[in-house]
Amino acid sequence: MRHFINIKNISSKDLRKILNDAKKRKYKRKNYSSLEIDKGAPLKGKLLIQMFEKSSLRTRISFFLAIRQLGGSALTLRPDELHFSKGGEKISDTAKVISVYADAFMLRTDNDSKLDEIYKHIKIPLINGLSPSSHPSQILSDIFTIEEIKKKKISKLNICWIGDCNNVLNSLIEASVKFSFKLNIGCPKKYGPSTNILKWSKENKAKLKIFYNPKLAIKNSDVIITDKVVSMNDRVNKKKKKVHFEKFKINKQLIKLAKDNAIFLHCLPRGDEVSDDVFLGKNSKVWTQASNRVHVQKSILLYCLEKLR
C-alpha cells in the first residue's frame, strides 16, 4: 500500500513517474470539459474521502476533480460533522471506519500528530492535503508547472524561495534533495527553516543556501516562489511579523535581480508579501500553477492506488 504523506518518504523514481504521468494526462485532456471522464476510467468505482480541518479552495476542488475525471467519486467531510473534532471517537477508530468505506483518504489537518495517528491505523492509502509541517501535493504540482513552463528539468534551474519558512517550504526543501536542484532561501533571521528540516537537508546533501538579504537570495534565479507571510492561524504577533518581512516583499525592483525570463509562483491565498505589479505581471504564472493541481493530483491518486502506468 502506498501513501503520499511527505516528499522525503517517496523515491525520486516514483516522484518522477507521477510527474511524467501528469504530463501525459494534461495533454490528453485538451478538449475535455471539467467532468468528462478520462479514457479507460482508471479509477472507476473508487471512492476518495477527503476531510478538511483547515480552509481550502484549490486542494478541495482539485482533488474532487481529480477523482471524478479518473472515473471515481469523492465525499468531502468536515470534522465538525463527525466525532473527529469533538473527541467523541478515537482517531484510530475513525481511521478504521474510513478504511471500510473508502479506497483512499485525503486529510488536511491542523495537527501533525493526527496525521501520524491516522497513518498508524488506516488500511487504505493516506494522502496529506496539508499539515503544519508539509504540503507535498502543492510542491509536486509546482515542480510540474516549473518544468512545463521552463521546458527543462528542475535540476538545471536555480530556485528561490523568499518569505516565511513554513510547511510549503519544508516540502520544497525535501523536493530539492529528491530532484537535486539548487535552492536559495531569503528570510529574516528569526524566521529561518526549522532545526529538524535543516538537519535532514544537511544529512541528505541538499544544495541549499540561506540568505537574510532578499537581494542576494533572488540573484540569478530562474524561479521565485513565495507564500502568505501572515496566515489566519499564525499564533504570533502579526503586526510585528509583518514589520520583520517588509524588506522581503517581492516587488518590481526585487524581481529585476532575477533572470529576465524568471517566473513567479504563489500557492495562494496571497497577502502583502507580493506587489500587484508582480503578482499580475508578465513573470507571474500563478493561474497555470493553480490549474495544474488537478493533473498532478490525478497521478498522485493513481500512484497511491497502484494504477500508475
Image (cartoon, helix red, strand yellow):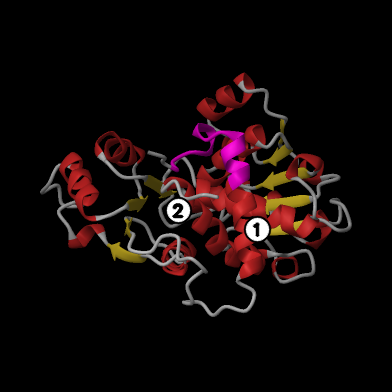
In the image, 140 versus 254, the foreground residue is 140
Q: Is residue 103 visible?
A: yes
Q: Which residue is mark 1?
A: 23
Quarter of the image holding residue 249? bottom right
User: What is the magenta range?
Assistant: 4-17
Instruction: Based on the picture, tell me whether residue 269 belongs to the magenta stretch.
Output: no
Q: Residue furthest left?
A: 88
Task: Give the vertical position of 197 relative to 169 (above or below).
Answer: above
In the image, 274 versus 70, the foreground residue is 70
Residue at the (63%, 34%) spot, across then down: 178
Q: Amino acid at mark 1?
A: Lys
Q: Quadrant of the N terminus?
A: top left
* Left or right of 95 in this view: 208: right
Assign a secondary structure to mark 2.
helix
Residue at the (34%, 51%) spot, across then down: 104
* Left or right of 271 in this view: 215: right
Task: Give the vertical position of 96 relative to 205 (above or below).
Answer: below
Q: Which residue is mark 2?
A: 301
Q: Amino acid at mark 2?
A: Leu
Assign a secondary structure to mark 1.
helix
Quarter of the image holding residue 191? top right
Q: Residue furthest front?
A: 40
- Label 1 and label 2: CA atoms lie apart by 15 Å
Residue 62: horizontal and vertical position, in percent? 48, 65
